[in-house]
Amino acid sequence: VRSGKLSMYDYGNGSANLKNYGVVEPPAYNLSNIPADLPLFLGYGGMDAISDVEDVERLIDELKLFHQEGKLTCQLFEDYAHADFVMATDAKERLHRPLIEFFNSNEHSN
């Protein structure tokens, strides 16, 4: 995140990265490895201190480079923080139902 790159976890020092990845710098994720026609649903919260909006939108922009139009569904929940996706009292209606509908509508798309 701090580097502006979409890369694997940085262990904070070259030797730990070398041990885990075989290189000093953490490697970038290759989003082109995700099948372009794979339906993806990405929900994110506007109040999330762990996965903030700017970072998620950077991921979305990267995914759009490799993904077929119409196969990437993104939904921002402005008032949701990280735990709200499982603990919010309205998650069933606002998130879970649309997610299930997404799965159902894409059940036979591949």
Image (cartoon, rainbow, N blue to C red):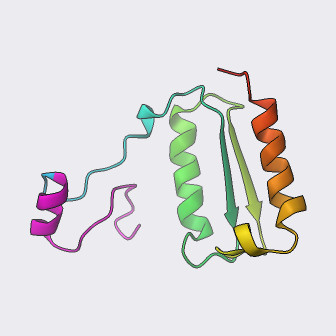
- Tell me residue 90's x, y (percent): 88, 69
- Tell me residue 83's x, y (percent): 67, 75
Q: Residue at x 72, y 31 (%)?
A: 70
The foreground one among 41 and 25 is 41
| Residue 5 among magenta residues | yes
The quarter holding residue 64 reads: top right
- Tell me residue 62's x, y (percent): 50, 45
The total of numbered circles placed on residues is 0
Is 36 situated left or right of 83 in this image? left
Of the 4 image quadrants, the one containing the C terminus is: top right
Highlighted range, magenta: 1-21
Q: Residue at x 35, y 55 (%)?
A: 7
Q: Is residue 40 above or below residue 15?
A: above
| Residue 75 among magenta residues | no
The quarter holding residue 30 reads: top left
Is 16 situated left or right of 56 in this image? left
The foreground one among 45 and 82 is 82
Q: Residue at x 41, y 66 (%)?
A: 1
- Tell me residue 39's x, y (percent): 65, 34
Is 31 situated left or right of 100 in this image? left
State whether the magenta stretch is mostly helix, strand or loop. loop
Residue that lies at the very extreme toward the left in this rendered image: 15
Q: Residue at x 43, y 33 (%)?
A: 32
The foreground one among 27 and 3 is 27
